[in-house]
Amino acid sequence: MASPSTDSIPRPARPPFWRNPAVRGVFYQLLFIAVVVAVGGFLVHNTLVNLGRQNIATGFGFLHREASFAIGESLIAYAPSDTYARAFLVGLINTLYVAVLGIVLATVLGTVIGIARLSRNWLVAKLTLVYVETFRNIPLALQLLFWWTFLREGAPSPRQAWRPLPGVFVSDRGLEFPLPQSNPAHLWIFLAFVVGLAGAVAVSGWARRRQMATGVQFPSGWVGLALIVGLPLLVFLTAGTPLAFDWPALKGFNFAGGGSVSPEFAALLFGLTIYTASFIAEIVRAGILSVSWGQSEAASALGLRPGLTMRLVVLPQALRVIIPPITSQYLNLTKNSSLAVIIGYPDLVSIANTTMNQTGQAVEGIALIMAVYLAISLTIALSMNLYNRAVALVER
Amino acid sequence: MRIKHWLVGMGAIAVMLGLAAAAEAGATFDKVKQAGQIVCGVNTGLAGFAMPDSQGHFAGLDVDICKALAAALFGDVSKVKYVPLTAQQRFTALQSGEVDVLSRNTTWTLQRDTDLGLNFTAVVYYDGQGFMVAKKLGVKSAKELNGATICVQPGTTTELNLADYFRANKLAFKPVVIEKLDEVESAFFSGRCDAYTTDRSGLAATRAARASNPDDYVILPEVISKEPLSPAVRQGDDQWNDLVRWVIFALFNAEEKGITSKNVDDMLKSDDPDIKRMLGVTPGAGKSLGVDDKWAYNEIKLVGNYGEIFERNVGESSPLKLARGLNNLWTKGGLIYGMPIR
């Protein structure tokens, strides 16, 4: 009695490999990549051929040539005899300078306005509503021109400059203020500050661990502040208060000495901060409203004071809602700083434009601008994503 | 979905092929003749050189060069489309074929002639860079501008000359660089800058057109650069280059021979062989250029000779009140010299 052989049951024929969904998937993806690469390659080739046909020089060699144009404001040493590469660097630093300051200021202002929007005080709530609706609905370029014209036309000439404080001058050339002259002791003061900061972090970590273990609180905030301010102050006093100021003074046409802020920079920083803050305010407001009222009530029932409720219960939950859209606002602010061109602040785009015009290397110049903005934006996005991960809901 | 990606890719390829084909069609001369109009890149608004009036019609010396071209090609000065360009846009506009000729107070330099792939045709205005300051500053010379804040347009030879001049004289300055001409001018007049620098013709134009009281501003005596302003065309566009160049030379020669828009009809009866050749009474010159033999006649009849163009737009009778100076005929001590038409 032979058992029925399993071989006798016909197995379905293996489908040909081109009907295998996995193989097809890979094939189409490869095809797609090939098309993208081909199109990209064609675009580059076509551009090069056409530039060659029009007898336009190509390549990045121009970066090593002498720029021979002057730049109005620079945080690093720059002279017309420096190279185009150096000029680009000046522009990049100027862009980063205004973007970083703008992001910090817009975050502070936006958070304050956003919380004020929720105030139970009618006047405060309505005033901030007017602020938000005004500034986020007027095109930024117009706002920049407005601030620039306002600062330029509103202020007197250098010879009639206002003096709100001794040594501080406001004129249509900008704001001039005294700067401390550098002194070897300043390095030690700075080191003391770093040590104080590290100490404050250590104390706060120790206090937290102790509170977790024993429940006993420690005023780590005050101690930290004392360390951060006190140590440098101590060094400053023991070094014999080495503080001499470099005072601005009217010399010829303009002020010499001290530090200064140009109307272009001020207008750009004002405009970017005020515009972006109006968006951030709405994001902060939405974030706070997204935390249900029951959370605050529960916190109160546990006996937490309103400040602690906000800091320990509401804000950590609101941050999860706030951070992703606020990242977009930071990116917007950075990219919007390129509007500096219209008011003559020498940012990256402004300097790249000049370079392109002096050298005719438009394609290379635009490529550089795009690469730099992409790099800046990706860096901001990366750090904000890391921060977002840190504050995100940890599921257990 | 994947089909869609593919279609997008193919579409992009098709578009780029189309662009490549467009770039291939190089000969501007044929293109212009076929289109029946010249696309002329001009300044966005510089009194005396290219400035739109209240009806939006452009007028000025640079504009008249475009009109002379249209008169020579089509016998009609209205066959021009004006494209206003900023200092930064101008070369890209010409390189990419957006305009056929760039007649926009542009300085002829080696680097532009070579690296930018341009050809300059003939100098229509010999200019030089200068400085303008408010009279109340009491500045008498550019050498006194140490430490001054100076308004300047970016992407110009002006910007480079400025840095060179201050470097050479070991003086310090602070540039305020703004692209739009009207913005840079208003920055200067509002007092943001101590001095404004550009070509001296441009300074005169700005002072005449923008200052609330032109007498409150002085143009300093120093001329810190050579600025030969010339219309430009794309390199490798020889027939078109020839036409633009000879249209300009004809304007010069007409002034030299005393042919004006008023007497050009009488001049047709002249016995001077030079005039006969120029006005097409003796045929040949037009044919060589590929245009009607009446080309120069039409130019002079419809636009006038160089002297008339100069007087009308920038000369003593215009608000700019510029003297002929270097821009007088070579026979009168200037540099304007038309090559012989024969």
Image (cartoon, coloured by chain):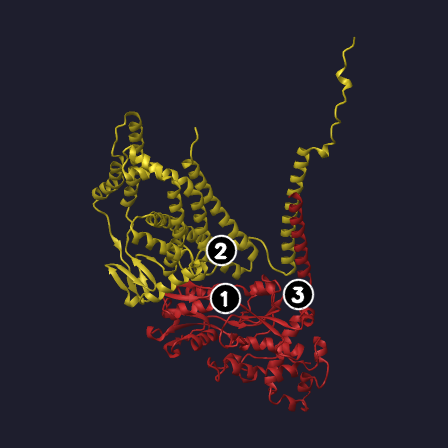
Chain colours: A yellow, B red
- Element carrying mark 1: helix
Q: Distance between the residues labelled 2 and 1?
A: 16 Å
Q: How far apart are marks 2 and 3 (CA)?
A: 29 Å
> What is the quadrant of the C terminus of chain B in the image?
bottom right
**Mark 2, other Cα within 10 Å: few <14 / some 14–19 / many ≥20:** many
Q: Quadrant of residue A266?
A: bottom left
The label on residue A84 is: 2
Which residue is rendered at x = 38% and y = 67% of the image?
B193
Residue B158 spot, x, y in % from top left: 47, 67
Give the farthest residue toward the top. Answer: A1
Q: Nearer the viewer, residue B19 or B68?
A: B19
Give the amino acid at mark 2: Tyr
**As drawn, is B170 to the left or to the right of B10?**
left
Give the amino acid at mark 3: Gly
- Element carrying mark 2: helix
Residue A273 spot, x, y in % from top left: 38, 53
> What is the quadrant of the N terminus of chain B in the image?
top right
- Element carrying mark 3: loop
Residue A250 spot, x, y in % from top left: 29, 64
Q: Which chain carries label 3?
A: B
Give the amino acid at mark 1: Thr
Q: Which of B228 and A362 is in front in this view?
A: A362
Q: Mark 3 highlights which residue?
A: B236
Q: How far apart are marks 3 and 1 (CA)?
A: 24 Å
Q: Mark 1 highlights which residue?
A: B157
